[in-house]
Amino acid sequence: MTDQAATRHLSSQRGTDDPARRRPDATGTGYAHAKAILLGEHAVVYGTPALAVPVHGLGVEARVRPAAEGVHVDSELFAGDAATAPGLLRPVVTALSAALDLVGLASGAQVRILSSLPHERGLGSSAAVAAAVTRAVADLASVELGPDALYKVVQEAERHSHGNPSGLDARAVVADTPIRFQRGRVAPLEVGAATTFVLADSGGAGSTALAVAGVRARLDADRPGVERVFARIAELVEDGAVRLARGDVAALGEAMTEDHRLLAGLGVSNETLDRLVAAALAAGSAGAKLTGGGQGGCVIALAGSEEHADELATALRGAGAARSWTTTVPAA
């Protein structure tokens, strides 16, 4: 039985005895974390692979309670009737509606969103919020969603945010380990040695939709040239997976830095991101690059150790980063 079929089967058995319907004080909770793309963004939209790592220190918790009618959202960005929510929250409303339909709860809901994940920084905030809300609705209905059912709901919400998302964010924000992603499918990555990364916020919002549109325009203007870039990025992704599995930080860093140069050539970097990458390399990082949609958002830099990560963070803030975070991927 598929994930979706199993979910339909569970919800069809609930009827009027559903505890979420009988108990107005019931609360469902859900969580999802940030992600960082290690290698392969933008090319992944055209079917090449990409690697992503979880950022467990940044996340979103959603709490959903049943309501007699209507949907009320309470978050730092907006509080009120979902029908009047700003465009930034439309993916959340989409995920909530799809999740309620999926688990068979047709009544209204009150949604509280608690997030430490910055918006529009290429760290998967919209996907993480959608995933947390979907998990909270499923928890409220006492339905366990399989990964494919969860992915379908989050991906539907992501289309409202990014237009034509690859699906990487929808998978990465709920993956506990680094993943290889291609055309909707994921596989866990081997990690040969604990690897520490520093994420630095450029201070400017990125726009995945605009960046993707820019790459599309370049592809339309010079398909052979851009496809060669995509092919090289795909090679770096596969090499990067091998290097991560071997714990070869130096070689992984070389792949990251080359990937950044290729992405810059596609027009998805900017002066601030380039400056932060240069500052990370000057401070001893084995490799650094933009992560996510680009044209703003964050860079990710490899640290030699957790102590070196502190030095990198200081250097990046000195180069203009608004804030930074450190995350370590354990050996596995």
Image: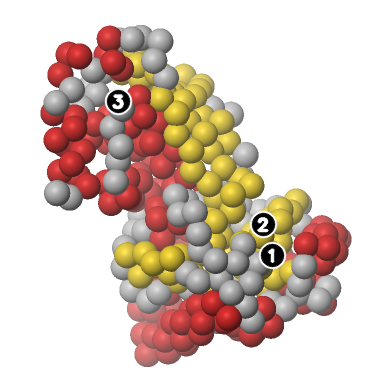
Lower position in the chain sequence, tag 1 or tag 2: 1
Q: Are marks 1 and 2 in contact (CB under 8 Å)?
A: yes
Vertical arrangement, residue 116 with respect to residue 291, above or below: above
Q: Which residue is mark 2?
A: 327
Q: Secondary structure at mark 2?
A: strand
Q: Is residue 30 left or right of residue 101?
A: right
Point out which mark residue 287 bears: none
Q: CA distance from mark 1 to mark 2?
A: 6 Å
| The C terminus lies in quadrant | bottom right
Q: Which residue is mark 1?
A: 196
Q: What is the quadrant of residue 8 in the picture?
A: top left
Q: Residue at x 32, y 65 (%)?
A: 185
Lower position in the chain sequence, tag 3 or tag 2: 3
Frontmost residue, 182 versus 165: 182
Q: Residue at x 40, y 53 (%)?
A: 170
Q: Amino acid under label 3?
A: Ala
Q: Residue at x 18, y 22 (%)?
A: 14
Q: Position of residue 216 (x, y in %)?
A: 39, 71
Q: Residues within 10 Å of mark 2 (few under 14, many from 20)?
A: some
Q: Residue at x 17, y 50 (%)?
A: 2
Q: Position of residue 203 (x, y in %)?
A: 70, 53
Q: Secondary structure at mark 3?
A: loop
Q: Which residue is mark 3?
A: 141
Q: Residues within 10 Å of mark 1 (few under 14, many from 20)?
A: many
Vertical arrangement, residue 238 with respect to residue 295, above or below: below
Q: Residues within 10 Å of mark 3 (few under 14, many from 20)?
A: many
Lower position in the chain sequence, tag 3 or tag 1: 3
Q: Are marks 3 and 2 in contact (CB under 8 Å)?
A: no
Could you tell me if residue 296 is visible in this image?
A: no
Q: Position of residue 305 (x, y in %)?
A: 77, 67
